[in-house]
Amino acid sequence: MQRARDGSVLWWGTADTPGPEPIVAPGVAAPVSVAVSPPLPGHSVTVEYRIDGGPVQETPALAESSPLEVGARVFRAMLPGQAAGLIEYIPVLRFVGRPISARLEEQAQPPRYQVRPTTAPIDDARSPLTGQASSTGRPRWDWEPKFLGCLTAIVYKE
C-alpha cells in the first residue's frame, strides 16, 4: 500500500489486485492490477519496470470497467514478456499526467519477479522419448492432447 501526494491510496499484489507470480515463464506477459482510492478525474496509472537493473521503462495501465469496491478504481497493466532476468516494477499514480506517487528509482526494495523456465531439468539418463516418469514420479513431458478436428480422405487408384 502506498500513499500519493494528493492523499489517494494505491495498492497491488493482493487477492483483489493480483500481480505477477514470483517466477514467470520466458515470453509471457505479466499482469499487474492496481487499485486507487478515492478515484479522481484526472487519475491514471503507469507501471515503471526495469530488467536486471537496466534503464527504467514504462507501460500504461487501463481503467477496468467494474469497480473493486465503492470508492476505489482498478487499473490493469501488462508488463511485456521478457526472455530472462530479474524484473523490478512499481505502479505509479499520475494526476493529469504528472507522477504523484513514488517512482521506481525512489524505492529501495521494489516488487520483483524472475523470468526463467518453470520446467525442471531432466534428472536421470533415461531417454525422454520413452515417456517414462522421472525419479520425481512425474512424466517427463508435461503436455495435454487437444482435439483439433478430423479429416476424411478418399484415395482413388487408377
Image: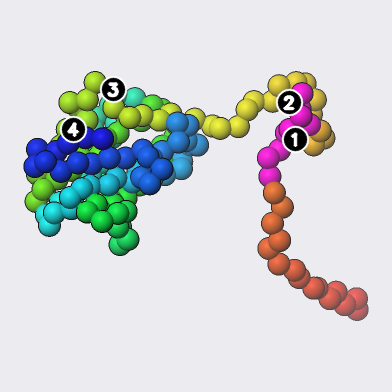
Q: Amino acid at mark 1?
A: Pro
Residue hosting label 1: 139
Residue hosting label 4: 103
Residue shown at the point (33%, 30%) measured from the top left: 111
Q: Where's the C terminus, which quadrant?
A: bottom right
Give the magenta range. 133-143
Q: For the residues marked 3 and 4, what is the alpha-carbon distance in whole angstroms?
A: 12 Å
Residue 9 appears left or right of 6:
right
Near mark 2 (Cα within 10 A), the count class, few <14, some 14-19 or many ≥20, is few
- Up-down: is 109 above or below 36? above
SS class, disc 4 = loop
Near mark 1 (Cα within 10 A), the count class, few <14, some 14-19 or many ≥20, is few
Residue 84 appears left or right of 106:
right
Q: Amino acid at mark 3?
A: Gln
Which sits earlier in the primary sequence, circle 4 or circle 2? 4
* Residue 10, picture quadrant: top left
Residue shown at the point (80%, 25%) measured from the top left: 126
Residue shown at the point (32%, 53%) measured from the top left: 68
SS class, disc 1 = loop
Q: Which mark is residue 109?
A: 3
Near mark 4 (Cα within 10 A), the count class, few <14, some 14-19 or many ≥20, is some
Q: For the residues marked 4 and 2, what is the alpha-carbon distance in whole angstroms?
A: 44 Å
Residue 79 appears left or right of 134:
left
